[in-house]
Image (cartoon, helix red, strand yellow):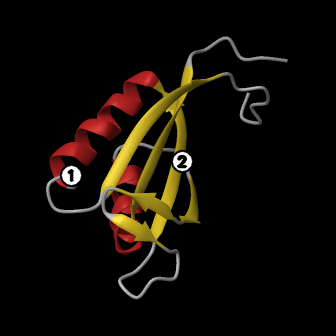
Amino acid sequence: MTNDATNVVVTIIAEQALEPLLVRDLEKLGVAGYTITDARGCGHRGLRSSTSAEGGNIRCEVVCARRLAARILDHLELTYYEHYAMISFVTEIVVLSDNDA
């Protein structure tokens, strides 16, 4: 069974120290749920371990409507991009099971 509504997943990879701030902001923006996991990898800021001395990274994923995704991305850009290590992107998805339906 599929849901014909267009949904996206917003993925945010950010400094672990930002987790409480991101959670607060996502809730204020109206996000109903999210998943946060530890993340590690290498990018233009170098190798980041999930247990590094300067703190690791997190990966936050939010399934939502495209309009809410745009609000989330605008907020992240205005609030965090200039001063923190963060990347975010949007992927179109098809929800196969929606327990809230």
Task: Count neighbours of disc 2 (C-alpha within 10 A) and say few if under 14, some if 14 to 19, many if 20 or more.
Answer: many
Residue 68 placement (x, y as % from top left)? 39, 31
Left or right placement of residue 13 versus residue 36 in this view: left
Residue 59 placement (x, y as % from top left)? 51, 57
Left or right placement of residue 32 versus residue 84 in this view: right
Q: Amino acid at mark 1?
A: Tyr
Check contact, mark 1 vs mark 2: CB within 8 A: no
Q: How many marks overall?
A: 2
Residue, disc 1: 81
Q: Quadrant of residue 36?
A: bottom right
Residue, disc 2: 61
Depth order, front residue of 84/28: 84
Instruction: Determine the residue positioned at 74% across, 31% down.
Output: 98
Q: Quadrant of residue 37?
A: bottom right
Q: Real-space Cα distance between discs 1 and 2?
A: 17 Å
First reached walking from the N terminus: tag 1 or tag 2: 2
Q: Amino acid at mark 2?
A: Glu
SS at badge 1: loop
